[in-house]
Image (cartoon, rainbow, N blue to C red):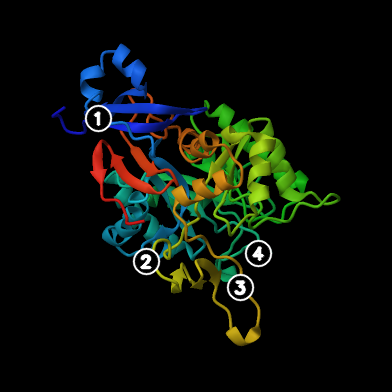
Amino acid sequence: MTDSGAFVVRGRLVQPTSVVDDGVVVASGGRVTFAGSMADAAATGYGPAVEQVPPAPETYVLPGLVDLHNHGGGGASFPDVTSADEALAGVLEHRRHGTTTLLASLVTAQPEVLLTRAAVLAELAVAGEIEGLHAEGPFLSHRRRGAHNPADLQEGSVDLVRDLAKAARGFLRTMTIAPEVPGVTGPGGVAEALVEAGVLPSLGHTDATTEQAEALIEQVVAALAAAGGKLGPMTATHLFNGMRPLHHRKPGPIAACLAAAARGDMVVELIGDGVHLDAATVRSVFTMVGADQVMLVTDAMAAAGVADGRYELGPMSVEVQGGVARIATDADAGAEGPIAGGTAHLIDVVRHAVSAGVPLPDAVRSATAVPAGVLGLDGEVGSLEPGARADVLVTDADLRPRRVLRHGVNVPVAAS
């Protein structure tokens, strides 16, 4: 093979529901042409091209990972960047670890700041370096705001939605909203305006009752159906985190989200990084709703891939100790601040999910095909089916990156 974007990779191929012990991926022109067993490759006529590649039973071959909730890494904070080059450093930090498709996430800030940051990040989307933007706020609950600046939270504004979508040059893909915030649900509200703008609403950072959450879900499901099914399904932003806890007499939004996911109306995000959720919670959600309704995410911030220390996340200062990011507080007060994003890469989250008891194909699917489907990119990214973009992650037996290809081109891999 001599054309650009051509390669053959051999190893234990992770397919949507199984692992092929001696599998092979063949690509040409930056697209997958074959993915399957060595025996099938030979039978299909690929024998001469693949037989010269030695078996690699100590490696896994995965689709490139897809992260739809990511605030940065490598020292770069997407909510704080002032240039596309600065933001690209964060993108490349995750790409080196196998995340080949990414949404750059903003946090709650003043409207003019959000518009400025969206315009900068849109440059990366136009250049094909990211798939688009995710706005986490500012229409969120004060009580469940987490690491979001309370002074910048506001009631729902259709004008801001439209301005933000315009500043993002059509690349605003998702927005986190709380159903109980005035102006979010109902006719003429933010949820309606988002769908009209081609932006997927995501329920999160909310103190809503079950009924309030159900009302938003029902509205969005109907609006997405009326839009022709080009978007969706809707999502829940990091289920459990930033939400009223599930209680048997006051079930809150979590019950509504789990029910919606179980019937196929919602995909729920899980930050399964070993910090945000207990392993049993991750395993239980996969069991309850199925891997096709779960999306693994990092919620990464600037400290992903770099040392502990003090960082910024929008207008908030964050202290990272032992790889755990929290809003910086007065040390003399003796209280820990809320968790402020993650410091893991998405392959780390996949590894944690597998350690929690999630089958490897399910964990991989929830970090590839499921988020790709949410973006409407089925068959383009997040899979290794013929015709898909040649985005491939090769790991060792412990799911640590050994090789990354994007569009069929090798990406420098971070040292493990």
* Amino acid type of the residue that numbered disc 2 sits on in the rendered structure: Gly
In this view, 249 is above or below 235 = below
Q: Which residue position is annotated with label 3?
A: 337
Task: From the top left corner, tell me how far across and down residue 269 is, in percent.
Answer: 57, 46
Q: Are marks 4 and 2 in contact (CB under 8 Å)?
A: no
SS at circle 3? loop
SS at circle 2? loop
SS at circle 4? loop
Disc 2: CA contacts within 10 A as few (<14), some (14-19) or many (>=20): many
Image-based side of 128 in relation to 265, left or right: left
Residue visible at 60% across and 69% down in the picture: 150
* Amino acid type of the residue that numbered disc 1 sits on in the rendered structure: Val
Mark 2 or mark 3, which has the lower sequence index? 2
Q: Which residue position is annotated with label 4?
A: 142
Q: CA distance from mark 3 to mark 4?
A: 15 Å
Q: Which residue position is annotated with label 1?
A: 53
Q: Are marks 1 and 3 in contact (CB under 8 Å)?
A: no
Residue visible at 33% across and 27% down in the picture: 24
Disc 1: CA contacts within 10 A as few (<14), some (14-19) or many (>=20): few
Residue 75: give its label. Answer: 2
Mark 2 or mark 1, which has the lower sequence index? 1
Task: From the top left corner, tell me how far across and down residue 260 is, in percent.
Answer: 68, 36
